[in-house]
Amino acid sequence: MKRKLSLVAALVLAVAGSAMAQTSIATLRGGTPLNTESEPPAMAKEINSDLRQVRNYPEQPPLIPHKIDGYQIDLNANKCLSCHSRAAVEISQAPMISITHFMNRDNQFLASVTPRRYFCNQCHVVQTDARPLVENGFVDIDQVLDYVKNNQGSSD
Amino acid sequence: MLGFLKRLWATIRRPSVHYSLGFLTMGGFVMGIVFWGGFNTALELTNTETFCTSCHEMRDNVYAELKTTIHYTNRSGVRATCPDCHVPHDWTNKIARKMQASKEVWGKIFGTISTREKFLDKRLELAQHEWARLEANDSLECRNCHSDESMDITRQSARAADFHQRLLFTGEKTCIDCHKGIAHQLPDMGQASLLIGAGSAQEVSSYLDR
């Protein structure tokens, strides 16, 4: 009995081991052995088109369509607000930060940007021209509505 | 004292007895080269990144911050060192700035910014001095490298091109008005950084006091 069990265990281990070796998990290292350095992928360029991107859903924080290299956002200064603040947009012609950024958690409006919205790149990010690592089948709500409308007769 | 000065004047006035005219002329000429050359060499020695960063105040604070910026490393390999931006290149103005900088020697001796905390407390004041200097000379040190004439705005991003056309080329603003904190980190700007277009602090306080 004991011998049979250990045989089964050995078989299971062998099968599992070969299966693990075959399914390669996507890692940054790739298939490079541990004792050598893998070739890192080339760094992707940031998109600096200055053209506003479409939002995939209304609540999406707008993407940053320009480079933000070295922009200081800390206790002392906020570089983004030097163009996007309420007072600066006349000169900069940049979009003003949304009024939600003046609201505290109880939806009360404050005189200036609320601390919880101060760190811009917690939500707003730049985009790069890198190829997506996985395919994305996202469809936005307009396409969903179209689909529903077109299939209304058949599904009901 | 007066007697000494009189004797000195008499010595200077009296024709030379032992030395030939040729020796005195050539000697004066050679010594002139030595002293003038020595002066300028010493001046240029104090005008290097190595000299500036030989003090820990500069090396650990402002120089450490510079290292991450585009003026230190970039795609074309041109580096702006400390004196490129902080000392005028023109001789007369350079001497004037160097004389001002003697106060910094005082600061060094008495440890005005000898710790990180002292530096951070002073940071706003130090930055304001530099901003005021660059505003007063129309960002001369920026323009030593970046000139309006050689700036091809078609190679800039749409945003930058628009700003430069609208504000820089018209002379409405100068480089430092927008490009603060590009080589070193900004001090506590408070609300001032958000008030580009708004009224001055005096206007606000006079309105509120009414």
Image (cartoon, coloured by chain):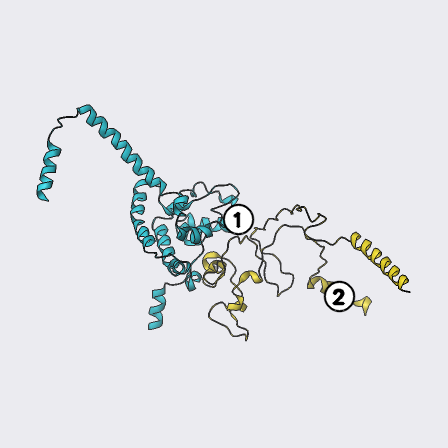
Chain colours: A yellow, B cyan
Dot 2: chain letter: A
Looking at the picture, tell me which residue is in the foreground, A82 or A34: A34
User: Which of these two is toward me, A44 or B104?
Assistant: B104
Question: Label 1, on which residue?
Answer: B157
Residue B38: give x, y in percent of width and height.
30, 36
- Tag of residue A148: 2
Residue B70 visible (yes or no)? yes
Mark 1 belongs to which amino acid?
Ser
State the CA–CA distance, disc 1 to disc 2.
Answer: 42 Å
Q: Picture quarter containing residue B127?
A: bottom left
| Location of residue B84 in the rendering, given as x and y in whole percent from the top left corner | 40, 44
Viewer-side residue, A51 vs B118: B118
Question: Which picture quadrant has residue B92?
Answer: top left
| Disc sitting over residue B33 in the figure | none
Q: Mark 2: few, some, or many residues within 10 Å (few <14, many ≥20)?
A: few
Placement of the C terminus of chain A among the 4 image quadrants: bottom right
Percent of width and height locating residue A112? 47, 68
Circle 2: residue type = Val
